[in-house]
Amino acid sequence: MSFLYKMAPNLENLGQELIKCMHQTFQMLFISGSIAFILGLILGVLLIVTKKGGLLQNQLLYKFLDKSIDVIRSIPFIILMVFLIPLSRAIVGTGSGITGSYVALIAGTVPFFARQIETVLADVDHGLIEASEAMGFGPTEIIFSVYLKESIPGITRVTMITFVSLIGITAIAGAIGAGGLGDFAIRYGHQMGYRDMIWVTVAIILLIITVIQFIGNMIIRKTTH
Amino acid sequence: MIQLEKISKTFRAGNTQVHAVKEVSLDIGLGEVFGIIGFSGAGKSTLVRCINLLERPTEGKVILDGVDLMGLPQVRLREERRKMGMIFQHFNLLRSRTVYQNIAFPLRKSKLSKTEKHEKILSLLELVGLSDKKDAYPSQLSGGQKQRVAIARALANDPKVLLCDEATSALDPQTTKSILNLLKKVNNELGITIVLITHEMAVVKDICDRVAIMEDGRVVEEGETADVFSHPKEKLTRDFMDTASNINKIYELLEENHELTRVKEGEKLVLLTYSGGNAGESVISYLAEAYGVQANIIFGNVDILKNKPIGKLVVVLSGEGANMEKALQYIKQRKVQLEVIKG
């Protein structure tokens, strides 16, 4: 402990605050991350199956999803966040604080993730889909047992990439009062000039990413044959 | 077993239409090995996909064992599909699953109990000779082994029909041979009807009872394999025959004006084709005896099609005018096909 205080003297006073902010970041990552993962997966699958030549070809739905994703992805996150405040109020009752950040974080992550899932699923050999159809399987079974099951390594890879970008935008969410490590670094590290606190924040974020990548790589290794 | 009635399949790409299959009618009997041969782009892949409705024909009827597949709702169609196994050129195994799990995959829908499924998979592994590879992943197998797994998987639901889409085209000749032997075994021991499409003459020659030759979306010739290839009516059929023999080499030599193909005054370069009983060699010796026409064999080739020999000889006949005419007449009488190439 004393070594840490020596390296980062302000930690002694701000330790409690840092832990609180870490907690907020984890909360944002976990809640919006899980929801975005599921929504992105669903959307990515929808893109693949409604595409021309897909299992449940539906050009109209595909075009709608495709364009919506492009539109949302082209809005910078900080603008998207303030833009979505009314929607957030309608859904979770508030447009600020941690609770108020979820809608924006999810909206900022899902289109990016869905696009990557689409790319991963497009790599599944069409022959496998054809073979499964020939075996008498329906679309639902093919989606779960072939598309998703065969793509676990790819899905893990893009989940890691998306997770890193999610960490990036949770730091911005501090601007609407959601707190978190980004907010901590701005308030204490930048505005109050405690450089050591910036270093500490960077170290923590690097640690989170390292752990996530370690787990991800392990899953990829175990599922690639 | 399988009846195709005037099947047509048209693909639309923008404003252009591609007629992949045009009014094909076939009747494939129970326990038969039926080959569909054609060069790439002939529409054979589309045709075989029309049998299990992976491609829905634009027109026509597909009848499997008395059931009109086109009229079935999706759920019933999927049940019918389980009566047809299918194997592919690129095997299409699930990479994330072991050999055992790949064979188990189509059994998910089966009503068998867990132990019955397990025994079924083990017996299939034994049938295809891969019992020792049951826990291997497809990436650890050779092409031939992958196709064996695919065959085991296709047989898991006890199908009545096995559809083979260029099943040996990605394999070397020796492996092709072993896969064909396995298919023969499947046909003989389990009585499964096999429909196979290929561009390789060797495959058809080896295992097909009947064959249909496809060109440009149509079946141009159809019949018993030996009949079709011993008396080919269409040029395409002859082209296929030639791919399997060295006889077309003569045309290359002709182009080069090779000394073997040069004929002197009063000589003729001819191609003789004979099948079954009327052996060409005895004809040749008779020509010399009766007409004094000498036959000099340049090229020879004998194919065995479903146990019937089909021979081709390229010979230079030399003899004096009138006798030569008589000799040619005699050859025709002996039901040996005669084609005068030069002279």
Image (cartoon, rainbow, N blue to C red):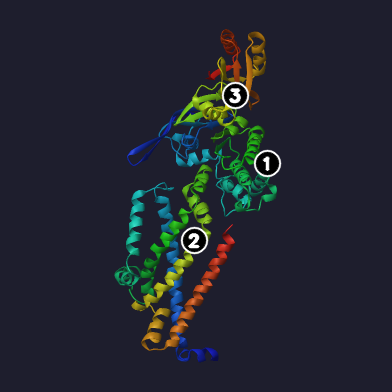
Q: Amino acid at mark 2?
A: Ile
Which residue: 47% across, 30% down?
A: B215
Q: Disc 3: which chain?
A: B
Q: Secondary structure at mark 3?
A: helix
In this rendered view, identify the residue nearer to me: A133 or B177. B177
Q: Disc 2: which chain?
A: A
Marks 2/3: CA–CA distance? 53 Å
Q: Position of residue A195 (x, y in %)?
A: 42, 87
In the image, taking residue B335 as reference, residue B282 lies left or right, namely right
Q: Secondary structure at mark 1?
A: helix
Q: Secondary structure at mark 2?
A: helix
Using the image, determine if residue A22 lies above or below residue B75: below
Marks 3/1: CA–CA distance? 29 Å
What residue sits right under mark 2 in the picture?
A155
Tell me if I can see residue B1 in this picture: no
Marks 2/1: CA–CA distance? 36 Å
What residue sits right under mark 3 in the picture?
B226
Few, some or many residues within 10 Å of mark 3 (<14, 14–19, 20+): many
Q: Position of residue A34 (x, y in %)?
A: 46, 67
What residue sits right under mark 1 in the picture?
B127
Which residue: 40% across, 86% down?
A: A188
Mark 2 vs mark 3: in front: 3
Both on one chain, marks 3 and 1? Answer: yes
Tell me if I can see residue B166 in this picture: yes
Q: Amino acid at mark 1?
A: Leu
